Image (spheres, grey):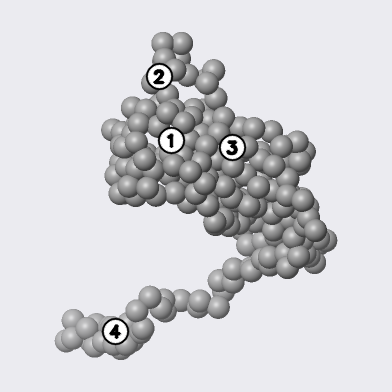
Amino acid sequence: MLLFRFAASLLPMLLLAACSPPGLSTSASSTQTPKRSYRVNPAPSQTYRIRMVIEGAPGPFLWKLALAQYDVINPECLRPPKDNPGGRSSPIPTQSIEVPLKQLSENEYEAVIHADHMLDEDYTGRGVCRWALVQFYVPMKATGAHEETRFIPSIPELGEPKISMLQTEVVYFNKNGYPRGMMEDFPDTGAPRHRFADWVRDEDLFTVTFIPTQEVQP
């Protein structure tokens, strides 16, 4: 009889779970903090053209994705730990924006980016959060298959004054990772030439060169 009563008490709970829509938890979902939306600058004025040249690669890169990364650079505009659940600091807002990559020749491409793509706003009532362009990168694969190496050339630390100085960036990669290495979907970010061992020959490497130029505004 005791076992029967225990089973009967569980029945309403089982029915409730069975009737709940997929993915809906029985806990209060209203306690979750909604994701904040960040707005794009409707009138960007700091425009740069970046040319990308691939030299010495052992094969083609049929899959490429150009991305510009923007971060908030003044964390004092975010909520401090005492105002966040669990006492955690607010994460630094970041946005990676896909940029059209135009092919100019067999191994030469071009992208146009805006350093002021994101709109500076007061998101938390603690002052205006300022966005900055911090990186331009182009993940590439031989054909796009999952197991292939992801070569990720980039212009890191792209904020001011680096972007305005229009510095050329050369990234070296080992050909041995093409089209795939020992690990599936391995992310190879490359390195400057001096980071490779002395016994690595120039013919063992290929390069991706970024050449930024500033757009003239009308």
Q: Is residue 175 visible?
A: yes
Q: Nearer the viewer, residue 95 or 163?
A: 163
Q: Is label 1 in contact with label 4 (beta carbons under 8 Å)?
A: no
Label placed on residue 108 = none
Q: Label 4 neighbourhood size at 10 Å, few (<14), some (14-19), many (20+)? A: few
Residue 191 pos. (x, y %): 51, 28
C-alpha distance separating marks 2 and 1: 18 Å
C-alpha distance separating marks 3 and 4: 56 Å
Q: Mark 4 sits on what residue?
A: 18
Q: Amino acid at mark 2?
A: Glu
Q: Quadrant of the N terminus?
A: bottom left
Q: Is residue 117 left or right of residue 22?
A: right
Q: Residue at x 65, y 52 (%)?
A: 113
Q: Mark 3 sits on what residue?
A: 210
Q: Residue at x 46, y 76 (%)?
A: 27
Give the quarter of the image for residue 10. Answer: bottom left
C-alpha distance separating marks 1 and 4: 46 Å
Q: Amino acid at mark 4?
A: Ala
C-alpha distance separating marks 3 and 1: 17 Å
Q: Quadrant of the C terminus?
A: bottom right
Q: Is label 3 in contact with label 4 (beta carbons under 8 Å)?
A: no
Q: Residue at x 29, y 87 (%)?
A: 15
Query: Element type at marker 1?
Result: strand
Label placed on residue 188 = 1
C-alpha distance separating marks 4 and 2: 63 Å
Q: Closer to the camera: disc 4 or disc 2?
A: 2
C-alpha distance separating marks 2 and 3: 20 Å
Q: Label 2 neighbourhood size at 10 Å, few (<14), some (14-19), many (20+)? A: few
Q: Closer to the camera: disc 1 or disc 4?
A: 1
**Mark closest to the chain's N terminus, 3 or 1:** 1
